[in-house]
Amino acid sequence: MTTVYETMYILRPDLGDEQAEQAIAKYENLLRDNGADNIQIQNRGKRRLAYEINRHRDGIYVQVNYTGPATVIAIFERAMRLSEEVIRYLTIKQEVHEEKAEAAATA
């Protein structure tokens, strides 16, 4: 059984394309440096927020799926909390069962 994490974060809408890509690369490198692997990043683009956050009505949504030790979450979320470019983030832990374990259990 491996632990897979999914983090969705929202960047400020007034960031340019280049600044947004730099922010995404910064967080990807932070994950890599702290032991995360299988990193998949999806830039969902600028979308309307459900409610206003810090006087922003829009945001740039980014989804990151990765595996790694639980200690990487605290480091990753602390960096986003201290950053002024991230207005909201959420991390979800997913349990994924390997197919080999399921095949052995049914045999």
Image: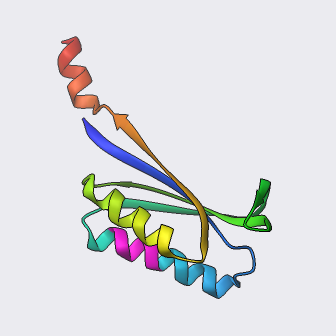
In the image, taking residue 59 as reference, residue 18 lies left or right, namely: left
Magenta range: 26-31
Q: Is residue 100 magenta?
A: no
In the image, taking residue 102 as reference, residue 43 lies left or right, namely: right
As displayed, is residue 25 above or below residue 41?
A: below
Q: Residue at x 37, y 76 (%)?
A: 29
Tell me the quadrant of the picture where the C terminus can be found. top left
As displayed, is residue 81 above or below residue 92?
A: below
The rendered magenta stretch, by its main secondary structure, is classed as helix
Indicate the position of residue 1 as horizontal and vertical percent values: 24, 35
* Residue at the farthest top position: 107
Indicate the position of residue 26 as horizontal and vertical percent values: 45, 79
Q: How many marks?
A: 0
- Taking depth in this image into account, of 64 and 80 the one nearest to the observer is 80
- Taking depth in this image into account, of 72 and 55 the one nearest to the observer is 55
Indicate the position of residue 21 as horizontal and vertical percent values: 58, 80
Q: Residue at x 48, y 74 (%)?
A: 82
In the image, taking residue 43 as reference, residue 24 lies left or right, namely: left
Q: Residue at x 77, y 61 (%)?
A: 47
Indicate the position of residue 103 as horizontal and vertical percent values: 24, 21
Displayed quadrant of residue 37:
bottom left
As displayed, is residue 104 above or below residue 100?
A: above
In the image, taking residue 1 as reference, residue 42 lies left or right, namely: right
Q: Residue at x 24, y 54 (%)?
A: 69
